Image (cartoon, helix red, strand yellow):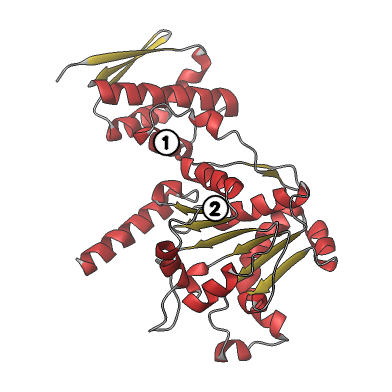
Amino acid sequence: MEIYEQRILITNQDSISKLLGTHDKNLKIIKSYYDVNILIRNDEIKVIGDKSSSKIVAKILEDMMNTIENEGEITEQKLSYIIEANKNEIDIDFNKMLKDVIVTTSSGRVIKPKTVGQKRYMDLITSNDITFGIGPAGTGKTYLAVAAAVNAFRRKEVERIILTRPAVEAGEKLGFLPGDLQDKVDPYLRPLYDALFEIMGIENFMKNVEKQLIEVAPLAYMRGRTIDSAFIILDEAQNTTNEQMKMFLTRLGYGSKAVITGDITQIDLPDGKKSGLKTVTRILKDVEGIGFMFFDTTDIVRHKLVQDIIKAYEKHEEKKNG
């Protein structure tokens, strides 16, 4: 194997300790992925190894330094994103790519993509009238869709936001809950309310609900309607039947955009019922104007253990089925 040396100039000496991490933890993480030597001398970093690995690691270190310069630090989670971003796309400008602001919350917090997958998801939503976000918990599928909806609403690209989910237990078990139908289904819609509260602010959210510019409703309420000039989000779509999925997709009217999110490993439908989300990925995969984003564990933005838990379950399922 030919030994290759890649050099990187350190422009800010103060950033070296942050780059290395406590007890060189960041370098150890990088070296767990790539068999290279990393030497730091004065104002220069040398990466020594085979050509491919050395170039990728040099790019990772440059992205880390840019992140420290822009954000003041480099977290283990951000390092994980940078490593994953550079695995297959050595020319990608990670920091520039993730600077796109989706929306600013009522409290002034900026919401941006945090992973390459999330950025692709946002690009698909922008360029398609119907987008599917499919993947495990913690990848930001629903939250980012709500952020995109609020952004489109504020920019007057749509007149309304409609968020919906199937209430899987809309039979007997809901009957035991107090209140009218809306009260009974509210627990199923709570994650959608929470995302809207955080991004819009409760007061602003309530005003728009009163004006019927925002609607959060169970999927059954969509039947028989044609929805124009709206941003519609169908959440937990893995729990739709084939009939429900077809019904929802054919509600789309002029000037509307739809995002459908779900996790096909978390289907709660009764035995014998097929998931509409699973079926639709085969039926509509080649239809122009419809985008599919398949997230994986590298896009999980919750605690690192969530990634490990999901990977462990995936291995268990593979063993069980293999």
- Closer to the N terminus: mark 1 or mark 2? 1
Q: Residue at x 35, y 35 (%)?
A: 88
Is 199 on the left-hand or right-hand side of 266? right
Residue nearest the observer in this picture, 165 or 130? 130
Against 211, residue 55 (above or below) is above
Q: Residue at x 82, y 57 (%)?
A: 204
Against 180, residue 214 (above or below) is above
Q: Where does label 1 land, which residue? A: 85
Q: Where does label 2 land, which residue? A: 289
Please, what secondary structure does the residue beneath circle 2 have?
Answer: loop
The C terminus - image quarter: bottom left
> Which label belongs to residue 280?
none
Residue 18 visible in the current orientation: no
Task: Give the percent coordinates (x, y) of residue 2.
Answer: 17, 17
Is 174 on the left-hand or right-hand side of 227? left
Residue nearest the observer in this picture, 204 or 161? 161
Q: Say if mark 1 contacts mark 2, CB within 8 Å.
A: no
Q: Residue at x 58, y 46 (%)?
A: 127
Task: Give the percent coordinates (x, y) of residue 202.
Answer: 78, 59
Please, what secondary structure does the residue beneath circle 1 have?
Answer: helix
**Amino acid of disc 2:** Gly
Distance between the alpha carbons at the discs numbered 1 and 2: 26 Å
